[in-house]
Image (spheres, helix red, strand yellow):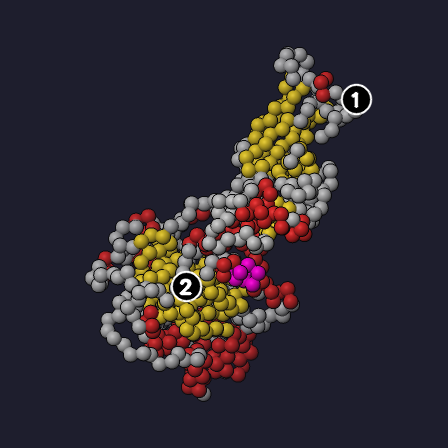
Amino acid sequence: MALEKDQDSNTLQWEVSVTLSSNQPVIGSKIFTTETKLVNSYHTTGSPPPPHSFVYTWYRHNIPCSVHRHKLATVQCTACVKLNASIEKSYHCSSKCFSDAWNKHRRYHRRTPYADRKNSTDNQQGVKKLRSSGSWPNLIEGSVLDENAIMVEEDNIWIKVGSSNAYIPTLSDCDFRLRLHSAAVDSSLGTRLSLDNIVVTDPVIKPSRPPRKMIRLRNTLNSNLKAQSSNDVVFSVLTYNILADSLSINALEYCPRWALAWEYRQEILLEEIIKYDADILCLQEVQCDHFENFFEPELKKLGYSVMYKKRTGSGLFLGETEKSTNHGCATFYQSKLFKEIMKYELEFDKEASSVVNALEPKIKFNGSHRLTSKDNVALVVVLESLQNGSNRDAFQSRICVANIHTHWSKGHEDVTLFQVVHLVNGLDKIAQSQQIPLIICGDFNSRPGSDTHNFVVKGRANCVSEKANDPLGIFQYLKLHHSLSLVSAYSSFLHSDGFEEQRRKMNSQTSEPAFTNFTNKFFGTLDYIFYTDKSLIVESLLELVDRESIGNKGIPSPTWPSDHIALMASFRLRPPSHWRPSPPPFPLNPWHLAALRQHWFLL
């Protein structure tokens, strides 16, 4: 704020005193002035100040280019960050600026204590874009900002971000300090009554929550097993519906818009997934563009092999934009621990054709719309362990992992049941043929105690076909029983000694977590990790959370990036009870063969 020409700072007898609500700004949390008052500069008693108002300007500290000091840095050398090199010299105003300075810049890498590390990056050019400053101003590589939007003090650049007594930091502000200028203005004359009062905050921090830890089970049910060997195959599986960006608009009623931005959520999600360090990841609602541009490259860097199946889009008229934002299931596994033996992809719209063909002609059209227009998918992969020292034959160290996201809409529970029944029936055939352990996880869009849940854990669903729950009469065409001994991994908390805190977060009647999905319209469990208990032992589980720790409005939120919570279990393969011969080859498509047999039987 510039003084009026007829004013002299030495003649101003008033000064502003400001108190902030906090000196520690947090993304998404309003920081504001709790008290602003005008006091006599000379600390003497006299006439009161004239009628006045206060004006405020917020600035954010930004970093100048290390080469062109008058320009704002927009990129940072990633090698400098990895090598703990001089951070000040890592910033550049554009990719071209960095490239032009590369030969000189790389010398800084060699002077760092970590320059001789095994995987040295001193010869690799790599930059990451710095966070932009949002809508004011709009940064362009190499641009010089309008002088009214910035202040330059020596090597510090401050960008104007607000003009009221309150400011809500965004992701753009993370790690930067904020600066508030406050001054008093004569209400009648519009002249300044004071110099600027300047308050500088601590760097803006990102919201955080206590980390969730794995809890090792002391399972008395397994106390009679043979002594565990260091050569046993042990692995962990995580399932997580990450909330597709195209669906996040539903959370605008209770979650700040900035916390729903994909640029913010993707970083929180990746950070969370990396911390869990699971050997196998099963993610749902992964958009096609986010898989290709973010999750695939980022998780490949961490040693994961990847596979992805997006929804088919059947029944929808999708443009190019909609096709790229269509979501699906993604499965990742650590390539140093497993190799892929077989992979199956299920498209439930196509799998439903045999049931639709069996319907009476007068309801076939409705059946086609109800079943084959639901484009949900599942991914099934057979993995073989590469863990050193295993005393098993190769086929005895194999596991089958299914990743599913079923359909949900009110009044379509029969569609959800069909999709799960169809998946499990095919897996049953694989298990019978291969004698292989199974893990089925994902978002089943079914509550505990529902027909779908009962079918999985009880081996059958005693469904009564009524117009309300089976409008097409498809139950008569479904094989509503299976021979797999499937158990929910989280039921182990109720069947093990101790763990009172975790039991309080369970539903003792259903033996499932109290919730895995929490929005302003729903609170309950939809996500599961099921496993065959005759071949696998649960070693540990990711701790559950309670409603109080997650908030009362629902998720996503600034600290929880999805409307679902992640579930994770660590398993140990049970020791083989006897020698088994090598199994026959895997069926090319057990679901297709089952559908054909069912179809011909119905004819």
The residue located at (25%, 75%) in the rendering is 579
- Residue ID at (48%, 50%): 116
In percent of width and height, residue 450 lies at: 40, 64
Query: Residue 268 location, x and y as percent?
Result: 51, 51
User: In the picture provided, is 501 more to the left or to the right than 104?
Assistant: left
For the residue marked with disc 2, what is the amino acid?
Answer: Lys
Q: Position of residue 522 (x, y in %)?
A: 47, 55
Residue that protrudes farthest toward the left in the picture? 224
Q: Residue furthest right?
A: 6
Who is closer to the viewer here, 596 or 22? 22
Residue 538: which numbered mark, if any? none
Horizontal side of 540 relative to 356 (left or right) equals: left
In the depicted structure, whether residue 450 falls above or below residue 166? below
Foreground of the two, 124 or 488: 124
Disc nearer the start of the sequence (1/2): 1
Residue 574 found in image quarter: bottom left
Question: What residue would you read off at disc 2?
Answer: 336
**Secondary structure found at label 2:** loop
Residue 89 in which image quadrant: top right
The reply to whether residue 381 is in sight is yes
Residue matched to label 1: 6
Most frequent secondary structure within the magenta stretch: helix
Number of the front mark, 1 or 2: 2
- The answer to whether residue 131 of the structure is visible from this angle is no
Q: Which residues are magenta?
A: 290-297
